[in-house]
Amino acid sequence: MKVTAPYEEVCRYLGYKKGVRPEPEADALIRTCTARVEQVAEPRTVSTVLPLTFREGNEMELGPIRVKSAALRRNLLGCEEVILFAATLGLEVDRLIARAGAGRVAEGAIYQAAGAALIEEVCDTANDALRAESEAEGWYLRPRFSPGYGDFPIACQPEIARLLRTPERIGLTVTDSMLLVPVKSVTAVIGRSRQAIACHRQGCEACGKTDCAFRRDQA
Amino acid sequence: MNLREKLGRERLFFDGGTGTLLQAQGLKGGELPETWNLLYPERIAALHRAYLEAGADIICTNTFGANTLKFPAGGQFDLETIVKAGVEIARSARAEVGREGDAYIALDMGPTGKLLKPMGELDFEDAVSLYAQVVRISAAAGADLVIIETMSDSYEAKAAVLAAKENCDLPVIVTTVYGENGKLLTGGTVASTVALLEGLGVDALGVNCGMGPAQMEPIVKELAACASLPIVVNPNAGLPRTEGGRTVFDVGPEEFAAVMETLSAYGVHLMGGCCGTTPDHIQALTTRCRSLPFVPPVKKERTVVSSYSRAVEIGRNPVLIGERINPTGKKRFKQALREHDIEYLLNEGFAQEEAGAHILDVNVGLPEIDEPALLTEAVCAIQAVIPLPLQLDTSDPITMERAMRRYNGKPMLNSVSGKAESMEAVFPLVKKYGGVVVGLTLDEGGIPDTADGRVAIAKKIRNTAAQYGIPAHDIVIDPLTLTVSSQADAALVTLEALGRIGPEVGCPTILGVSNVSFGLPQRELVNSAFFTMALQKGLSCAILNPLSAGMMAAYRSYRALTGLDGQCGDYIAAYGGQAAAPAASAAAGPAAPLDECVIRGLKEGAAEATKAALASGAAPLELVDKLLIPALDQVGQGFEKGTLYLPQLLMSAEAAKAAFEVVKAAMAGQSQEKRGTVVLATVKGDIHDIGKNIVKVLLENYGFQVDDLGRDVAPEAIAAAAAQPEVRLVGLSALMTTTVVHMEETIALLRQQAPQVQVVVGGAVLTAEYAERIGAHCYAKDAMATVHFAQQVYPQV
């Protein structure tokens, strides 16, 4: 999968306000470091389809995984199935970030931002492919929803990883603190429904944390 | 004939898939297949029987994921019962089909599912322990061999191999998973993986899972080209494909067997299947391939060292070993070691890597330090971020063993000598962990004055190594460089010995080149001439300073002149179109004044400007107070006002740091005033450390001594560091809601054990209110806020 990190997104993750151009020296470093991340990243994704069952209150079953989350429930209402999805940029991006830890902090911050922008792009690209496949079979997809969004507990990460066999298949592992390693990784649930519902709000804009410093729609 | 005798002498067949077949019988996604050893033993037994009847010679126990991480003590299923049952089911299945005489039970161990430190959280020794437990149970239960399979991390594979070899005498086979890019998920290549595993002394190695047989062809070719051991190929039944939510494989038994026949021609000695393959696949495979001509493995006799991702061959093409990670004669480096400044070592490594070194020598020997601990720590830190193989340089066998054990690859070792004591200490380590060892041509009688004497010691080293089972190609002989200014024929004797070692001893050669010019002016002139002469005599590798333009010029010129650099490509890449550049930049002086360099974030410029200012007589501390700090303040204020952004702030900080480094070098040895000590750590469970690293650089620039404990640090370790009498401030970072709890725990412990310290906290999920609630003295929203708080805690005197 060859994907690139959008420059504006990298800048947003670095804290630049909308419309602000980085200083010439910073601009050059941002472009160099972003290219380096794109070069060492080895994006891999894996997914599977699971039946979805709504239980009492906000409880749901995604195949064998039991989840309680009002936010996820809202996202999945009207769906019969979910796609369980995971993606990672691979360990070389972690190494690049760690390497910069030895005193090259500007590079480190940019690798971090470029990695964040790139993994989002990888997810979007993979989701487009899944959408096309699903629509061919008469399914409509909901926006992807990740553990940690709203009240969707990140304690679900180990079960998601085990079900998708992410350690063996894409090298994605979960720590005891529920962190994903490699760090630039995403797991998500994507609802599949027979009804088309307009879902305009996606990603950043869908999040409830409106005071976030990195929020995309701020001036 | 026992299995070890059969390996490499006759073709053997493995069984096929397990998980995919159990799924067809109702195993659910996410359900642990090993539980079926207890829940449905008859189904597992039936599968084993089917494979044995299909002609498999080796069947794998249903224990792939059986370890304490997946079956913790006190859980629903007991690990020991599951593993024991796995071996017993396989044994009884073998008895039922009457194959006790010629079929073997392999204890099957797969990856732990956790990533090892430092990228992940599983400690190397913990990984060894959890594999060791399974090995002991199954060896006692009667397994005939150990297969470590589906490994995608060479480091984890090493842990598993050590566990197997330290806890049983059974043959050990390792197969790894390669992607379509020809690499392991963690970056290893075929060559680097083979070097590691052969060094560890496994009995056979190869590839499994990931791909179908057809896609494996390039991997099999490469394995055949570099492995000396029997080769195993256990592919999937094609590439996995999802169909209606289920994973399916498309390659049928006959097609599978046909492709395997093609692969076997490259020199494959053990064949079987992985995901999606069935007893029918194995039946077709054994029918078609059993009587194919068998080509035994070929010993390659190459000298290879490796890192996690790279193999370096020491052969005709000269290999450069960077010498700069070594305190000998370097005040600044010694200071770094005493201050436990691993970052300084890493930067020496980066510089040499960028200059073109192929291997890095690592020496941290100083009389007053704990060398075993520090070399191991340095090796772990370097190998995490630098892909070059390392040469572990120590005269202490304990230090050597500890570093070898943790090394992620097949290391180079510096060194063994012809002394009996040295050989007795070092060779068992080389045999156990693998490595290419430098043999110094000196012994109890000292360094012989003649080439004859040095060649004789080289032969003694080679012959003694052979008694330990270490082949000549894993020894690199150093005929020793002596100082030409004190002994006129010193270089000539070395060169003569050098020329004779290849033909007479059969080992590659190495020299530490720089010693030759000791005591002379313009040493690089003599060094580079001597280097060229040594290369002409067949020198295989040199320990040198790759940042020396003269040495690199000698190396590149030699390769161009001897046809090693095809069409002089490397030479032209290094020197093309920049003939006058080095002289010009030296004459032009710094690009801009120091303060401007800092403000614009020009790292090299800031260092150059500082050097120029010092050379013209500026007082170091005055430079700091009058130029550096005001420039940093200006940038910091811009950042706080929102007129300047994070990358620029950090680039300025790095430029200032580069300038400080020049000042520090100029003042090395003198005592330097520090404003106060700040202990920094990313709390337990949290591995995101960029924020902490940013804070560190800024604090250092403002004159604070930073004790950086790293990431994922236990509360006890933080409390211990904070309890040092000079510490008044601790900075903690946490990025996730799941790790903030450890921050709270750490603060509580600090209150008890280091009540004199103040605590500043930061991290994405924190807020001022939350920080207050968990007992922090200050919430810092960014790195500058931490600096301001530190300035309050340690007021300027």
Image (cartoon, rainbow, N blue to C red):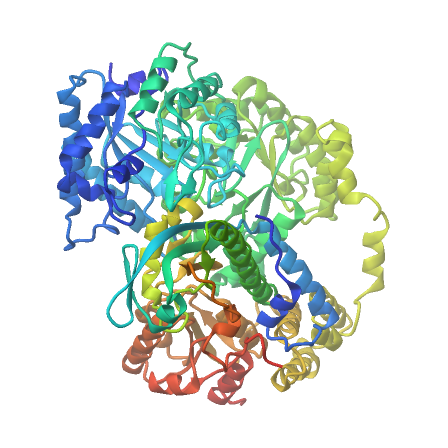
Residue B177's place in the image compared with B103, above or below, is: below
Q: Is residue B49 visible?
A: yes
How far from the left and from the top, in percent, is residue B383? 48, 49
Q: Is residue A90 left or right of residue B526?
A: left
How far from the left and from the top, in percent, is residue A112? 55, 64
Name the one closer to the observer, B256 or B331.
Answer: B256
Name the one closer to the observer, B780 or B485.
Answer: B780
Q: Is residue B20 left or right of residue B603?
A: left
Q: In the rendered image, which quarter is residue A114 located in?
A: bottom right
Q: How many marks?
A: 0
Name the one closer to the observer, B100 or B211.
Answer: B211
Q: Where is the N terminus of chain B found, in terms of image quarters?
A: top left
Name the one closer to the observer, B455 or B374.
Answer: B374
The residue located at (39%, 55%) in the rendering is: A84
Residue A212's place in the image compared with B207, above or below, is: below
The residue located at (52%, 52%) in the rendering is: A132
Q: Is residue B655 left or right of residue B102?
A: right
How far from the left and from the top, in percent, is residue B319? 61, 36
Q: Is residue B382 visible?
A: no
How far from the left and from the top, in percent, is residue A31? 68, 61
Residue B149's place in the image compared with A70, above or below, is: above
